[in-house]
Image (cartoon, rainbow, N blue to C red):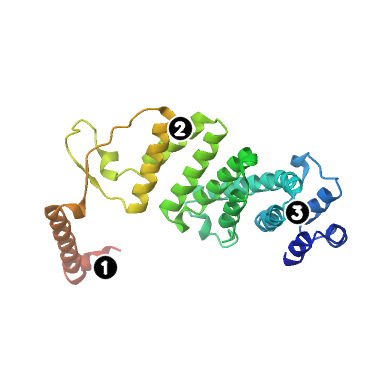
Amino acid sequence: MTEIIELIRENKTEEIIQNYSKSEFKIHELFVDLLKDNLTDDYENIEFEADKYQEEFIEGVEIFKALVKVDLQMEAMMFSTVLVFLGFKTGEFIHLLSNTAMSKGVHLSEISTVKIDSRLRNSMQQFYDNMDDNYLVPKANIAAAKTRISQAIFNQISKSEFGSDMLQMGISYERISETQMSKNIYEGVMNDFESESVKLSSGLFSEISQVNDRNEDEIKIYEKAKELLENITNTKIEEPKRFHTNESVSTQKLVEETSENIEKINKIESNGFFSKLKKWFS
């Protein structure tokens, strides 16, 4: 990768064509086609090996970043079309693998034969960040692809990281006038990042305060989604009354007492009659 990036920086087109016309990476050969003005626009017929989707995409992003850095805007724009196609294919492929794994009751990360490259999400974000306002549709597609991947590895990232990806996708769709899609995304984020007590409440007694059991990052994601939804719908969303457990001394004391009682019960079970029952009937 370093060599081709250096050649791009030094504007050594002929050397790139000579050295990378035949490469282990399909993305290199497509870049050569671009330089030779032979790049196909029939992207559906470009065949990448499924087990190399991630590696090919990461390699392609480094090339795109180099093109942007040396201000080869036309080449960058043309190359981005292939990269967006590959990024979308990568996201869909990983999503399919994840759904297959979940149908068997396991997370994708628990399958030894499948490995999600730790660089992939960051690479997609770098691609997104290096595209300006001339790339609004490609950015929306890459935001969606990154969210697909985050969804597939949800057990390996924080909830707030996934929420941030969802918000980025919603904002990206909003910027290309996919208003209903954005609205659905913001509503989904608000629901996912709502306090559990609010979700379980009937809503009949609005005067009753609900327990706010979320951390600061999760609250920020919720508030941002609420702000974006209010902007897009031009309406004010009524919030339920909430209180955090550490805001009330009596509540915090009750939580601590409950925790202590659970520990005592567990201790009795491990030392007494209950432990023998478990041993006999397990």
Q: Quadrant of the C terminus?
A: bottom left
Residue 81 seen in this snapshot? yes
Question: In the image, residue 260 lies at what x, y percent?
Answer: 16, 63
Residue where numbered disc 1 is placed: 279
Which mark sits nearer the N-terminus, 2 or 1? 2
Q: Which residue is drawn at 72% across and 48% down?
A: 76
Comparing labels 2 and 1, the label whose residue is closer to the camera: 2
Q: In which quarter of the image is the N terminus?
A: bottom right
Q: How far apart are marks 1 and 3 (CA)?
A: 59 Å
Q: Which amino acid does label 1 sit on?
A: Lys
Which mark sits nearer the N-terminus, 2 or 3? 3
Residue where numbered disc 3 is placed: 27
Which mark sits nearer the N-terminus, 1 or 3? 3
For mark 3, give the secondary structure: helix
Residue where numbered disc 2 is placed: 183
Question: In the image, residue 216 lies at what x, y percent?
Answer: 33, 53
Question: In the image, residue 254 lies at what x, y percent?
Answer: 13, 55
Q: What residue type is labelled 3?
A: Ile
For mark 1, give the secondary structure: helix
Q: How far apart are marks 2 and 1 (CA)?
A: 53 Å
